[in-house]
Amino acid sequence: MSCQLRLRVLRQCTPALALAVSLLAGRGAQAQAPAGTVEPVHRVANAAAAQTQQPTQVAARIAEPAAGAPFDLEQKPGEHPLMPALRVAQEGVQHIDADIKDYSAIMYKQERIDGELQEQEVAFVKVRHQPFSVHMFFLSPNKGRECLYVAGPNGEKGVLHARDSGFRKKLGVFELDPDGRLAMAGQKYPISKLGIRNLTTELIDVASKDINFGECEVRTLQTTIGTATDKRPVTVIEVVHPTPRKNFRFHKAQVFIDNELRVPIRYAAYLWPQNPGEEPPLEEAYTYLNLKVNNGFTDADFDRTKNVELFKN
């Protein structure tokens, strides 16, 4: 049964189920950038071969490689070209665990579900690492949607609290299994996988598998990313698998690491183009802008009974 058909069947059950299904589900077509962002222009290191990439509603310009990069990305003799990036990612997790307790950000998310690129979602997020806690307030396309998730003290799976926007808001807050069919409708990953730490550990997992194979091209670039009024210097690690193989998840992936905060703030992966000369289609992209770390979030910030701002009428 297709995703769209499954959603239609569920929506015929009850209004409550319709809310739960639509709450986290994406919808097709490309979203417009929120006010203040700039359409991106990606440029390869060789300016003569520069081409505009598929829009992702995030400002980014890749420039010529610059000297003095803040990360050690030098490939050692005889090692796989992914090893320097893998070491940087491993160091990033150690840095997050030691120095970043929580953060807030504007998150941009776009995913391809069942072969269809969904509309970009934008949300204000608050994340705490221990216990893992997430609050999301959607800014577009359905402003006012809200989600809250808190894991157990030892990482046990928690309950997803979710409320829709618009006229469905009156139906109230629903409690869902974060891995269940309703919560996962229109989503690639559960809310328990959200955030920069989970993104970094996923990159480590992928790279650890890819180093067992060849056909891998890696390059690094210096650029800035952000809105017109808030640009962040970043190091870009671009990985390309020229030939489709069953052991590769993507054709091209780009990781943007904030040079000051030393964490990834954007990840974008592209599939192989169907025809030679075509742009690679976007598979998934996650961007965290206006990132503010160590805000001192407490249990009360993620407790519906104590924080009157959560699911506020």
Image (tube, rainbow, N blue to C red):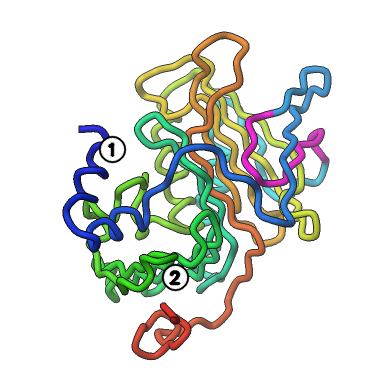
Nearest the viewer among 217 and 252 is 252
Indicate yes or no whether the magenta region holds residue 26. no
214 relative to 161, above or below: above
Residue reaching furthest left?
Answer: 13
Q: What predominant SS class does the magenta segment belong to?
A: loop
The circle drawn on residue 3 is: 1
Looking at numbered disc 1 in the image, what kind of residue is underneath it?
Cys
Closer to us: 169 or 31: 169
* Residue 301, x across and y down, in percent: 45, 83
Q: Quadrant of the C terminus?
A: bottom left
* Left or right: 133, with 254 as reference point: left
Closest to the observer: 84 or 186? 186
Q: Residue at x 49, y 39 (%)?
A: 284
**In the figure, is residue 5 to the left or right of 98?**
left
Give the CA separation, mark 2 to mark 1.
26 Å
Give yes or no for residue 65 being in the magenta stretch. Answer: yes
Q: Earlier in the sequence, mark 2 or mark 1?
A: 1
Residue 153 vertical position relative to residue 280 in the rendered view, above or below: below
Query: Can residue 185 be seen here?
Result: yes
> As drawn, which residue projects farthest toward the bottom?
306
Return the mark for residue 115. none
- Which residue is more in the foreground, 32 or 281? 32
Which residue is label 2 attached to? 135
Q: Which residues are magenta?
A: 53-66
At 80% from the left edge and 59% from the top edge, which residue is drawn?
A: 229
Q: Are dots 2 and 1 in contact, CB under 8 Å? A: no
Amino acid identity at mark 2:
His
